[in-house]
Amino acid sequence: MMLTKEYKKTLTAKAHQLKPVILIGAQGLTQAVHDEIEVQLQKHSLIKVKVHIRDKEIYKPMLSQIAEVHKACMVSTIGRTVVIYRESED
């Protein structure tokens, strides 16, 4: 799914008020984390994820994996907080 630049700006503005609903720690992307991301995307379609992993060699592929597995788009990244969007099925 490709998002236009204008739509990404709109989503980023909407996400500004959100708090991270997923925290990824030292254990990385476990099945429980994937399950919770799926639940939150079904509920909200726009979520923030906080990643507490500093290693860029792990961090960047992790974001790609989240997008691929959940058929979602990375809207923006600020520090270690990532905004993820997936169109609702409704």
Image (cartoon, helix red, strand yellow):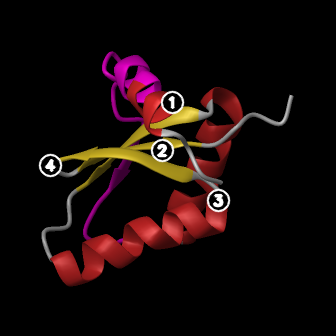
Whether 59 is drawn above or below 89: the answer is below
Which stretch did the figure color magenta? 10-28
Q: Pinpoint residue 11: horizontal percent, then vertical percent.
A: 46, 27
Q: Amino acid at mark 2?
A: Ile
Is disc 2 placed on a helix, strand or loop?
A: strand
Q: Pinpoint residue 34: horizontal percent, then vertical percent.
A: 57, 61
User: Which is more foreground, mark 2 or mark 1?
Assistant: 1
Q: Pinpoint residue 24: horizontal percent, then vertical percent.
A: 34, 58
Residue at image location 62% in from the left, 33% down from the top = 45
Q: Amino acid at mark 1?
A: Tyr
Residue beneath disc 3? 70
Give whichever of discs 4 and 3 has the lower sequence position. Answer: 3
Q: How far is mark 2 from mark 1, CA to CA?
A: 13 Å
Residue at image location 48% in from the left, 44% down from the top = 84
Residue beneath disc 1? 7
Location of the N terminus (image quadrant): bottom right
- Looking at this view, name the residue that lies furthest to the front: 5
| The label number, if any, that marks residue 84 in the structure image | 2
Q: How far is mark 4 from mark 2, CA to CA?
A: 14 Å
Give whichever of discs 3 and 1 has the lower sequence position. Answer: 1
Q: How far is mark 4 from mark 1, CA to CA?
A: 21 Å
Q: How far is mark 4 from mark 3, CA to CA?
A: 22 Å
Give yes or no for contact between labels 3 and 2 (Cβ–Cβ under 8 Å).
yes
Is disc 4 placed on a helix, strand or loop?
A: loop
Determine if the magenta segment contains residue 21.
yes
Whether 7 is drawn above or below 1: the answer is above
Give whichever of discs 3 and 2 has the lower sequence position. Answer: 3
Is disc 3 placed on a helix, strand or loop?
A: helix
